[in-house]
Image (spheres, rainbow, N blue to C red):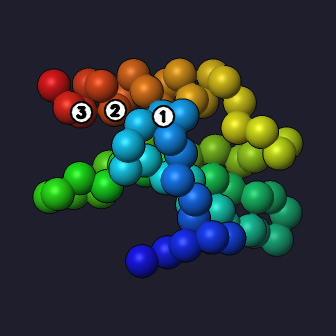
Amino acid sequence: MLEMPDSRPMSSIGKKSHELRINDQNKTWRIIYFIDDEAIVILDVFAKKSQKTPSEVIDVCKKRLALYKK
């Protein structure tokens, strides 16, 4: 299992949601994912430009997670 500093929980999105950090040569990428019993669901992938995750990304991830759980 991945742990800090590579991956951290994203409780602002939901239980079992995490952010994976990938440092590229020119950018820092983030993958927001949800761990389900039968799958790992990718909610979003984006290049992070600041310390804080943008609220628009959090909102989109919450909506996508809600759709998945339906």
Residue at coordinates 82% horizontally, 71% vertically from top-left? 25
* Image-based side of 45 in relation to 42, left or right: right
Residue type, mark 3 in image: Tyr
Query: Circles 2 and 3: CB distance less than 8 Å?
Result: yes
Q: Which mark is residue 13?
A: 1
Residue at coordinates 80% horizontally, 58% vertically from top-left? 27
Res 44 visible: no
- Residue 15, x across and y down, in percent: 38, 43
Q: In the picture, which quadrant includes the C terminus?
A: top left
Q: Which mark is residue 68?
A: 3
- Residue 35, x across and y down, in percent: 31, 55
* Image-based side of 52 in relation to 34, left or right: right
Distance Cα–Cα, label 2 vs label 3: 5 Å
Quarter residue 26 falls in: bottom right
Res 2 visible: yes
Say what secondary structure mark 2 lies in: helix
Query: Circles 2 and 1: CB distance less than 8 Å?
Result: yes
Badge count: 3
Mark 1 and mark 3 lie on one chain; the one further toward the N terminus is 1
Query: Circles 1 and 3: CB distance less than 8 Å?
Result: no
Crowding at dot 1, Cα within 10 Å, few <14 / some 14-19 / many 20+, comes out as many
Q: Which residue is mark 2?
A: 65
Residue type, mark 1 in image: Ile
